[in-house]
Amino acid sequence: MERSDLKRAVAARMLSGVVASGAIFFLTAGTFRYWEAWAFMVTLFTPMGFAFAYFLRHDPELLGRRLQATEERSQQRTLVAVASAAWLTEFVVPGLDHRFGWSSVPTAVVAVADVLVLLGYLLVLRVLAENSYAARTVRVETAQVLVTSGPYALVRHPMYAGITLMLLFAPLALGSYWALIPALATPVLLALRTLDEEKVLLQELPGYRAYMDATRNRIIPGVW
């Protein structure tokens, strides 16, 4: 993909993300007076914009890979469908919670949750900076090499650690206790994705067996 085309595609992806998020949050809330949603969007999309600009200049191939979202494995397609439903529910419930006053999360808790969401996203960006082959889909490319440095020295799937942190604390950042219920599906779904993904990596990525032996934990250091 030409750089100009990639730039337009990335800009369109980010704009669609902002519009879709705003639509979900504010339509379900029935108002724009939903400061937790505004804070959450600023927390998420501000570093995302800087990250897109950085990778467009320094690693456009990574962005090209990240734009490809069609899974080849049926197991992964099923997991993606279930995860999409769970995560959509997770982001719909807070607006409804705000509208009907089902729960009230203290401002301090919202602020701490926003910080944890940001830390999770920064971990994802750190992973992308370390591994140019960190695609959105489960596959191994011909020239792909095993990365064991940076966050990969701690766990085998550090990106999933960042995503887990983001999605588990997003409900509190959005001011909803009830949204924690669908959010609890995140660790389970990512664990299932990890187990299936490692089957592919063991078969197709040279050195992965030795890496598994050296780095025992998949997502959470010292736990799993």
Image (cartoon, grey):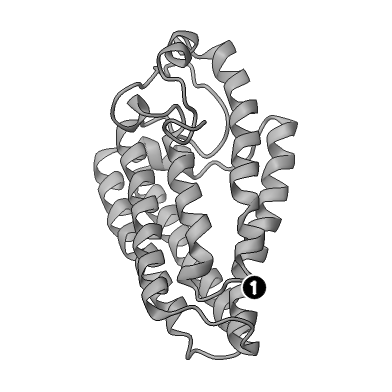
Q: Report the label total.
A: 1
Camera-side residue of 166 and 11: 166
Q: Within 10 Å of the Cα at label 1, are there few (<14), some (14-19), or many (20+) other Cα atoms?
A: many
* Residue sitting at x 64%, y 83%: 102
Along the line of sight, which residue is nearer the eye, 124 or 223? 223
| Image quadrant in which the N terminus is located | top left
Residue type, label 1: Val
107 displayed left or right of 175: left
**Is 178 above or below relative to 124?**
below
Where in the figure is residue 142, as x and y percent of width and height?
48, 16
Residue marked by disc 1: 93
Residue 179 position within the rendered picture, expressed as x and y whole percent measured from the top left:
61, 68
Query: Which of the pair 77/162 is nearer the observer?
Result: 162
Disc 1 secondary structure class: helix
Residue depicted at 57% across the width and 36% down the height: 137
- Residue 162 position, x and y percent, is 43, 46
Question: In the image, is residue 144 above or below residue 131?
Answer: above
> In which quadrant of the rendered view does residue 204 lie?
top right
At 32% across and 65% down in the image, what residue appears? 46
Q: Position of residue 29 (x, y in %)?
A: 59, 85
Q: Nearer the viewer, residue 95 or 77?
A: 95
As drawn, 98 above or below 165 = below
Residue 89, quarter of the rendered image: bottom right
